[in-house]
Amino acid sequence: MKKRILSILLILCMLMAPAVVMAEENASTNEDIIASYSGDMQKYIIKLYAKTLASNYYYGVEDEELLYSVICNVIEEGKLDLNSAIRAMVETLGDEYAEFYTPEEYKSFTEDISGEFSGIGVTINENKDGVVILSVFENGPAYKAGMMPYDYIVGVDGADVRGKSSEEIRELIVGEKGTEVKVTVLRAGKEIELTCIRDTVEVSQIETKMITDKIAYIKLIQFTSNAPDEMRAVVENLREKNVKNVIFDLRDNPGGDLNAAIEMANIFISAGDIIEIRYKDEKHNTMIKSDNYNAPKFKMLVLMNEYSASASEFLATAIQSRGAGKVLGVQSYGKGSLQSVSNAVGGAGFKYTVGEFYSFKGQRVHTIGVTPDFVVENEYIEVDMSQLEPIDIDVALENLRDENNVLALEQRLKLFGYLPEADGIYDEETKDAVARFQAMLGYSVTGEVSIYEYIFLNDYNYDDIVIPVDKQMEAAIKYFS
């Protein structure tokens, strides 16, 4: 299976970029790189990009059309600029998934997908008091160093970072795996310096629970490179428990790493054809296969909605067309195309569509989506304010922990998604919800409710808030009963 995946990547790499365009690490700036090319070299590069795009763009475009866009760009700009020329050609494709990246954007993009830069495993946010830590990933570098939620970051490697933005602080903290960074936090009025060893922090993409002793629930949030390993562990655990019925939730999953989707399909689907990838040049068309002769014999129901896209549609199509499971929900988004990412001169980059995936039976997904076997729509009801405990501001001014006001607070935090239930007890769960709500509002993060939160929640217009009724989950559970 790995050999097949590598062959697909090799095809994509061959489609991606002219060999003459390389990152030149010795050049001092991106402008220097471009300026170093002669006029003839620049014209050659433009022609080469036009030929590459015309040869590989899935929906077809002529070299002349691309070169004409460059001429128009030169007239508008009053000069020839390589990156502007490439941008003009990419925009001429009319491909909603094509995009040109500036050197800064491309660097950020490739760092995000490559995992080459590591951090300490925290999520942060800005408020009027500074940059606060919202969560600490379990067993990550920050967790091991003793960092805690609601610590404020005030120093990095001995430098005071008060007044800096969350993005500026992030740039100071991330770095190469295995290197050391000292982070000073403010906790309860005291500054504490913590030493973290940067590492690649893998965020869990899978949520699991047993709905009954016979029905397992798996939610895949996004297709990342580490998700297949997580899924293998989940599947093995279910096998040990002899679980036969699985609800596989791909709702709101935007996709992600195609190779992760291929590996996922190989986990659940027995040996044989699963998905066909088609390119403009048909000789590159590839049938993705599973080589798993020990696939789990689950009775599987895949949940999909209108926001399930790309890799999630790939996996659902594979499961459905091979009979490894049924699909329940509504028609999915319909993003069944594949993009190639390429570097350009001076550190810039771009992507464009080079193919589409079809079921192994030849059913198209792009612009159509995955059609569910069972169509079930969720319901949404408006908030009935008469069913909520009223907030008494006068009482709150005297007692912030008044039992009725606490219940009213929790009910509203539940509406916003910060609490699962409201019981009128100001416990650690409530304190954590208040702290996250304060961080969202940009207030001081204390976890202790103040009159300001009560006033905000009392004056808020709840007309636009609707409460989802998960009819799809209800139908899924009933399917197995």
Image (cartoon, helix red, strand yellow):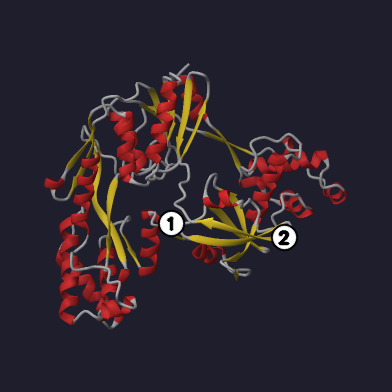
The 10 Å Cα crowd at callout 1, few under 14, some 14 to 19, many 20 or more, is some
Q: Distance between the residues labelled 2 and 1?
A: 29 Å
Residue 458: % across, % down: 74, 49
* Residue ID for mark 2: 190
Q: Can residue 296 be seen in this view?
A: yes
Q: Quick check: 241 left or right of 381?
A: left
Amino acid carrying mark 2 in the image: Lys
| Quadrant location, the N terminus | top left
Amino acid carrying mark 1 in the image: Lys
Q: Is residue 333 above or below residue 243?
A: below
Q: Which residue reaches farthest bottom?
A: 78
Q: How many labels does the image show?
A: 2
Q: Quick check: 324 left or right of 211?
A: left
Q: In this view, does 65 lie above or below 292?
A: below
Q: Can residue 369 be seen in this view?
A: no
Element at badge 2? strand
* Residue ID for mark 1: 177
Residue 380: % across, % down: 56, 36
Q: Which residue reaches farthest top?
A: 481
Residue 472 circle label:
none
Residue 326: % across, % down: 36, 26
Residue 143: % across, % down: 57, 49
Element at badge 1? loop
